[in-house]
Amino acid sequence: MLNVIILFLFVCNQCLCDICKTCVCSTSNEGLIINCYDKNLGNNEVLNFDLLTLDKRRPLNKLILSKNNIVFLPINELKNLKHLKGLDLSQNQLNNIHSDIFKHLNEIEDLNYSNNLLWAFDISILNTVPSLSKLNLSYNYLNNLEWNSENATKLKTLDVSHNNLIDLNFLDGMPKLEYLNLSFNKLASLPVDSLLNMRCLKILSVNNNELLSLNFQYFSLSLLELHAKNNFINTVTFDKSSIHILNIQNNSIFNLNNNLTLLEDLKSLNISKNFLLDFPDVILKNLETLDVSYNNLTIIPETISNKNCPNLRIFKANGNHLKDVTIWSNLNLEIFEIKFVETIEKIDEKTFLKLKEKNNSCINITISNNKKLNTIQENVFQHMNMCSLDLSNNRFVYLPPKLFNINKNISNLNYHINIQENPFVCNCSLQWMLNELVPRLYIKNRNFLEDLRCAGPPPLANKRMIHWYKWEGEVFCDESSHFLERMSVNIAGVSSKQVVTFTTGPGTIAILATAIALLTILMIIGILLTRRMIAKRRRINRRL
């Protein structure tokens, strides 16, 4: 009888209980990967048995058990997975982590417990897993992470975002961290000593907390990226730092002091959605990207220049209260953006005289979604080598052909022009668009023709310009073509239940009157000819 049971278990293990029949199995350079995402395995006893025997037959590198309604994870199920490197238990119903789970996972490196029901976690248990370098505890209900050991962990990556943390005492036990995500918690301050002692930390994210200030004295020189958007920060104290990327958007910052220059290695600064009235006169020789959008700027600061920022490539000043968008200092860029500015109405030929492309390159300019901007001079971009120009969704009724330098940039295959969603009046002054621009866009980028329409005159209202692609003649200059448009009906767009209406105007009435007069004359001539034929037949009949 015992032999029969053993034989049955063997057959089950080899055939019916093969986990790869339920989950997706694949191989990588690191080994076997089993993906059991959303397979409803919480109560699958057959699968449990297969986990027990899995590693005996084939070493497993990564096991994904996410979104399976797992409430309790029996320790025995994992005890044979000695070579497992990655374990994903996210999106389940787990409310604790037992230290015994790690006893047999001697080589585990990556553990994902995100999106579970954890309320507490003792970091000390990680000492039993010296190989663990990456831990994800995000999207839980953690109020605190306990630390009850003198031994430090070897974690390099920790994500505890989207929890309820209010203090960070546990950081004392993680001196090896390189990446730390504390976003979406309830932190009002950052611990001074803990951060200073984290001499390996490269990336720190504290977005969406309740921070009131930032002090760079408390950060290790190893820090390369700091993300602190969506807080209540009103004071930033700069100090010598190796930081490359600084994101402090959507805070309450009214000014940046001149100590900003201490960030000598800074490459990207995002200070959008604050209350800046100006930008400090500081040298940031390595700065490549600057975003000052949605502040209280009324002019483009003169301090943003080649002199102060010789390597600046990308500059964005969207959503400010700019009276005009004149560039006051020499500035060479690859990308320049002015969008959602509600206070500018005109761009004259001197506005961008000091703006040019980088050496041996071209420039991408976006001036869009400015609801009062209705005039732009034709020579504004004549001195530039353009990559792309976006003037979409403004209030232009007319644009001069010289504005786009089409002939100058015709060899630049990347020169894209987007002027969609403007209220163009399609008269003879815009005939050049049908002759030059529409054919170019049709070949290079048809997406920019989707909403390139006429807003007037009335016969052409809401017509897409592509409608006249390859038409002969000067369509926008010929009044008769307007009449034809007025009389035409798009049969494909009219159902059997729709009523077709024709609009009339003075031209239509004149043409109809002429047609009626001609028809009347023809009818009179026909009547006279008929009478004459009848009289002739009568004379012939009398002779007979």
Image (tube, rainbow, N blue to C red):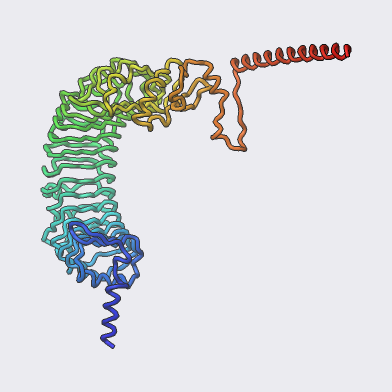
Residue 78 lies, with reference to residue 507, above or below; the image says: below
How many numbered marks does the figure carry? Answer: 0
Residue 512 lies, with reference to residue 74, above or below; the image says: above
Q: Residue at x 34, y 70 (%)?
A: 44
Instruction: Tell me if 291 is positioned left or right of 284 in this view.
Output: right
Residue 270 can be seen, yes or no: yes
Among the 4 quarters of the image, the one containing residue 360: top left
On-image quarter of the N terminus: bottom left
On-image quarter of the C terminus: top right
Instruction: Tell me if 240 is positioned left or right of 390 in this view.
Output: left
Instruction: Tell me if 100 is positioned left or right of 454 in this view.
Output: left
Among the 4 quarters of the image, the one containing residue 400: top left
Instruction: Tell me if 429 is positioned left or right of 272 in this view.
Output: right
Residue 120 can be seen, yes or no: no
Of 173 and 508, which appears nearest the observer? 508
Among the 4 quarters of the image, the one containing residue 326: top left
Q: Residue at x 35, y 70 (%)?
A: 43
Q: Residue at x 17, y 65 (%)?
A: 83
Q: Position of residue 233 (x, y in %)?
A: 25, 39
Of 543 and 96, which appears nearest the observer? 543
Q: Position of residue 227 (x, y in %)?
A: 23, 42
Q: Position of residue 80 (x, y in %)?
A: 20, 70
- Judged from this view, the residue extending furthest toward the front is 544
Q: Position of residue 283 (x, y in %)?
A: 14, 28
- Judged from this view, the residue extending furthest toward the bottom is 1
